[in-house]
Amino acid sequence: MLKECVIVDGVRTPNGRAHAEKGWFRKRAPDELMTAVFDALFERNKAVKPGEIEAVFIGCANQSGPQHDIGRLAWLAGGYPEEIPTNTICQQCPSGMSAIEHAARAIACGEGEIFIAGGVEDMLNVKMGQNMEPPMRLYERYNPMELPMGPTAEKVAEQWKVSPEDMIEMAYHSHIRAAEARDAGKFDDEIVPVEGMTEEGEKFMVDRDQWIRDNISRERMATMPTPFKENGVITAAFSSPLTQGACALLLMERKKADALGLSYHLVYRGGAMAGCDPTVMGIGPINAVRKLLERCNLTADDIDVVELNEAFASQSLACLRELGLEDNAPFKKTNLWGGALALGHPLGESGARIVITLNSIMKRDRPEARYGLAALCGGFGNANATLWEKA
């Protein structure tokens, strides 16, 4: 009989702007951000010792330079036991979610009782696509001008007929809800304060996400340029910003958590990876979620809370509509505390971050909810989705 995996805890750093002069974490390395969340997990869960971890799975999209095998090197740099194995995982943006699924499936199969899974991305010091050399044969199959993220978002907007007006509403409510959640202290339990630097160069403890705009304006968004396509519809307001951040979850076999007296709210019920045409990579969650729901004998109506990563407003709206989950913002069950348009999107971190936030929302704001769904698209047509049930 398969065992059950539960979320005992989940923490993340604040998300900082990936900006050389203005980013709060511009002087922090990705391994330091990972160590901060490792430290927090053990500080908050003293019944668990580092030497008892079966393995550590960390997602990262761009494993180059200071992010080379970041899972292993961050664990060792943080002073943690050498005998604990690690695995740095890449599935582009779903990397952090893949890390969670690896751990959950290992627990289900009885290959260990306690795992750490998470993700990290430093989009300042490791640029998107840095040192990447795609095979030339790829361009025999796909137009290279249609593979970058911006053009894919434009293509999705055109093919799925997503209007600028609807994207404005989505971006507006993403920032409004993120600001409301921040001001109400809803992120406090999942965010680990980390020392950063103000724009003026002074050190301070960062305890909030940097990208949330308190002065979000529909009127200003309507006049912004469209850099990805002449006379296009995708602007910076409808695109997730470049970000630095890390997160980690403590995942445990349910009976082990009970034996240690540890509380939990969600049980893992399944995951599904899917692929799609990379020139419309953003619609990948449609395939992943459909596969997952069919596998679990559920429909969209059974899902109570959704965390869908907002890589671009166009792809998020296309996915929500195709899946029958939502139509237009403000959403009733999706991204209730805002999404990546406001919170930022540190690529390989986001797939794990949205699971942490899903857990937080279902514990705090929707304790009666039974099923929670998290999903996201990824570069080159990767996508992933996970289903969680109230324990």
Image: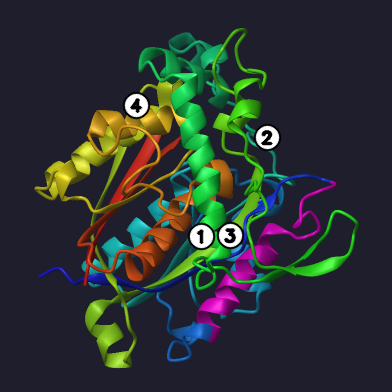
Which type of secondary structure does the marked residue at label 4 adopt?
A: loop
Q: Secondary structure at mark 1?
A: helix
- Mark seen at residue 131: 2
Q: Residue at x 68, y 35 (%)?
A: 131
Answer above or below: position of 234 versus 119.
above
* Residue 74 visible from this viewpoint: yes
Please name whichever residue, 341 or 247, is drawn nearer the observer in this view of the structure.
341
User: Which label's residue is closer to the chain start, 4 or 2?
Assistant: 2
Residue 182 position, x and y percent, is 56, 61
Q: What is the quadrant of the N terminus in the image?
A: bottom left
Q: Nearer the viewer, residue 135 or 197?
A: 197
Marked residue nearer the N-terminal end (1 or 3): 1
Could you tell me which residue is drawn at 65 percent across and 64 percent down? 33
Give me the C-alpha separation between circle 1 and circle 2.
37 Å
Identified at 48% across, 61% down, the residue is 118
The stretch of residues the image draws in magenta is 21-43
Question: Which residue is tagged 3?
Answer: 246
Determine whether, in the image, residue 324 is placed left or right of residue 32. Answer: left
Is there a contact, CB below 8 Å, between mark 2 and mark 3? no
Q: Earlier in the sequence, mark 1 or mark 2?
A: 2
- Residue at the (32%, 83%) spot, across then down: 263
